[in-house]
Image: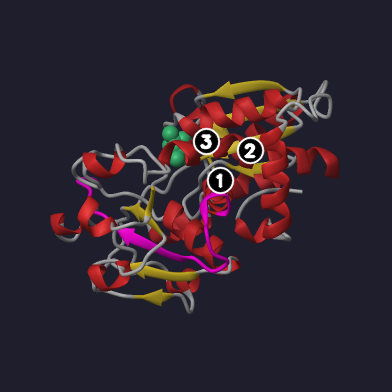
Amino acid sequence: MNYLSIKDIDSLANWVAEAKDLKNNPRRFESIGKCKTICLLFFNNSLRTRLSTQKAAINLGMDVMVMNFGNEGWALEYEDGTIMNQGTSEHIKEAAQVVSQYADIIAIRAFAGLKDKEKDEAEEVLNGFVKYAGVPIVNMESSIGHPLQALADAITIAEYKTKTRPKVVLSWAPHPKALPHAVANSFVEMMQLQDADFVITHPKGYELNSKITRNSTIEYDQSKALQNADFVYVKNWSSYNDYGKVMHENSGWMMTKEKLGHAKFMHCLPVRRNVVVEDGVLDSNQSLIIEQANNRTYAAQLVIKKILENE
Ligand code: CP
């Protein structure tokens, strides 16, 4: 079993219930991972994913190895048949098989480069490990998705919702840098599995991949979208159609207390204060950001436990 995307969740309701049970007693399965090793490979920076996934594995009794592959590993080659006389030093074929000599599970973070859509969508790092490693693979955020974050978000919504079918709004936010689509993509896919009145709002030109948004409601008027919201998930992403571009500043899309109304505020973090969202929201009791970060542990723990049970 791999956990590569939201599509790997067979029953969201069961997964959320099981994650909540783990949260109530995190050490209940502390012998399930005894004598097993998980290797976390980071091609990009992290705070939450790195620590919560380690904690999850430790809660299950596993040994954990972490490598900042992007800075410390050999530059990898992904193309078949390449004459490797340029910048790459090691082929993914060897690298993935080698890591799997040391690890029972490999978890990988490798962001989109946002320069070449086709290359990003091929997910050569994640899929290279899936193809050659021979052990289960967990996606800790790839070009296209961040399914551990979305699972933590689903757990958080389940904990805080006060009605069966809450209104959930994914609201684009301004950001000075071009950011990937992974968090937004997985959140959209997760919402499509939920009983929720789900609305995506963003300025024109920031449409996500229509193969992911499918028939989700898109409302270009932010204030209209936010009306009667129960949860507002704020996230920046760069243009998908004009791939990787920051099109215009749109500072008016920052989330404020006034816009939020009575809704709960969500963000995956890290967040740029007073650019993406104002201090008053983050510091209010409507903010669920720390609860989301806490639930990253139980999302990862559930995924790793399911993989261990499946082996
Ligand atoms: N939300 C999230 O994935 O945080 P990190 O990038 O710090 O891991």
Question: In the image, is 87 to the left or to the right of 239?
Answer: right
Quadrant housing the C terminus? top right
Q: Quadrant of residue 158?
A: bottom right
The residue shown at (23%, 51%) is 257
First along the sequence among labels 1 and 2: 1
Residue at image mark 3: 76
Question: In the image, is 297 to the left or to the right of 306?
Answer: left
Q: Quadrant of residue 289?
A: top left
Taking the image as drawn, is residue 240 in sight?
Answer: yes
Alpha carbon distance from label 2 to label 3: 32 Å
Q: Nearer the viewer, residue 260 or 57?
A: 260
Residue 273 picture location, percent across and down: 23, 38
Q: Is residue 164 above or below residue 15?
A: below
**What is the span of residues highlighted in magenta in the rendered image?**
158-177
Q: Is residue 166 one of those drawn in magenta?
A: yes
Disc 1 versus disc 3: nearer the observer: 1
Residue at image mark 2: 298
Q: Nearer the viewer, residue 55 or 287?
A: 287
Q: Quadrant of ligand 1?
A: top left
Q: Is residue 120 one of those drawn in magenta?
A: no
Question: In the image, is 192 to the left or to the right of 304?
Answer: left
Q: Nearer the viewer, residue 13 or 280?
A: 280
Alpha carbon distance from label 1 to label 2: 7 Å
> Residue 152 bears which disc, if any?
1
Mark 1 lies on a secondary structure that is helix
Disc 2 versus disc 3: nearer the observer: 2
Q: Nearer the viewer, residue 132 or 79?
A: 132
Mark 3 lies on a secondary structure that is strand
Q: Is mark 3 within 8 Å of ligand 1?
A: no
Mark 2 lies on a secondary structure that is helix
Q: What kind of residue is marked 2? A: Tyr
